[in-house]
Image (cartoon, rainbow, N blue to C red):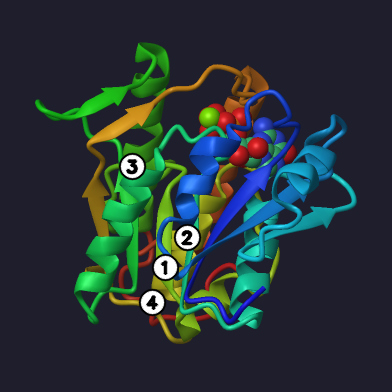
Amino acid sequence: MQIPGIVVVVPCYNEERRLDAARLLTLLDDRRQQILFVDDGSTDGTRELLLGLFGTEPRVEVMSLGTNRGKGEAVRFGMRKAIENGAQIVAYLDADLASPPSELRRVLDRLEQSDDLAAALGSRVRLLGCNIDRFPARHFQGRIFATIASIMLGISVYDTQCGLKCFRTTDALREAISTPFRSRWVFDVELLGRLVSCRNPLRPEAIVEVPLLEWQDIGGSRLGLRAKVRSLVDLLFIVGPQSRTLWPNRSPTRGSQ
Ligand SMILES: Nc1nc2c(ncn2[C@@H]2O[C@H](COP(=O)(O)OP(=O)(O)O)[C@@H](O)[C@H]2O)c(=O)[nH]1
Ligand SMILES: [Mg+2]
């Protein structure tokens, strides 16, 4: 890889059937951008497909985790590697491109517009004029989850679970990803909690949500009922110790690490 300005981490677990090479390549339209695919111990041909499609592209790297560790760890490994390689901005994006590359660009633009911002998060708000195509049941489950997460975190986040998030490389980010996440699926909440409660915390004002203009629920999600129930339980265990709502007077400490 060249010295990276912006690295887009794309976690992949058994994505052989869903990978759309042509759309993914548009992530490289911005010359500063690089893609780091993290193959999360896939058991199908994901790794071989990624290497075959992008093996000769200098701005694409494929990292392989030997065993499946879950999305949170796949993202964390990718972000750590990107930062070790010198990335100034690290983003992550789901491999199914439910958030399209054009929306990644908009969220990155928002982050880059202001030096005061440390993170810009895609947010699936169903506003008139926006094309947020979410399965109704998932929309309502997501709203309940995000509302609970937001109250517990003590910061107003509308959509904790959107798979598109962008961060400047800050001390807070380095610290937040220095140790494993406790949850496979609730890691976004854990990450936000750590960012605002670590030793060098981000001010909540340094984090913005950017309402997406376009988002589409792609079939094939493997987040089943069991994982959803587990996520709710994880939420209580994760956010409890670092909650600004539950512990309003607590000075910033090491968060959940
Ligand atoms: N399901 C699943 N996805 C993973 C895992 N590790 C990484 N991922 C990636 O996480 C992203 C979101 O997965 P997806 O199944 O679309 O979940 P969704 O959030 O319900 O749409 C995709 O890029 C997956 O390839 C894992 O262990 N399980
Ligand atoms: Mg998906």
Q: Is residue 254 left or right of residue 78?
A: left
Q: Residue at x 70, y 31 (%)?
A: 15
Tell me the SS state at disc 4.
loop
In the image, 136 versus 92, the foreground residue is 92
Image depth: mark 3 or mark 1 in front = 1
Count up the numbered dots. Answer: 4
Question: Local crowd at mark 2 within 10 Å, few (<14), some, or many (≥20)?
Answer: many
Which quadrant: the C terminus? Answer: bottom right
Which residue in the structure is indicated by mark 3? 159
Q: Amino acid at mark 3?
A: Asp
Q: Is mark 3 within 8 Å of ligand 1?
A: no
The reply to whether the C-beta atoms of the residues labelled 2 and 3 are less than 8 Å apart is no
Question: Local crowd at mark 4 within 10 Å, few (<14), some, or many (≥20)?
Answer: few
The reply to whether the C-beta atoms of the residues labelled 4 and 3 are less than 8 Å apart is no
Q: Amino acid at mark 1?
A: Phe
Which residue in the structure is indicated by mark 4? 250
Which residue in the structure is indicated by mark 2? 91
Q: Real-space Cα distance between discs 2 and 3?
A: 16 Å
Q: Residue at x 33, y 74 (%)?
A: 118
Tell me the SS state at disc 2.
strand
Which residue in the structure is indicated by mark 1? 167
**Where, by quadrant of the figure, is residue 217 drawn?**
top left
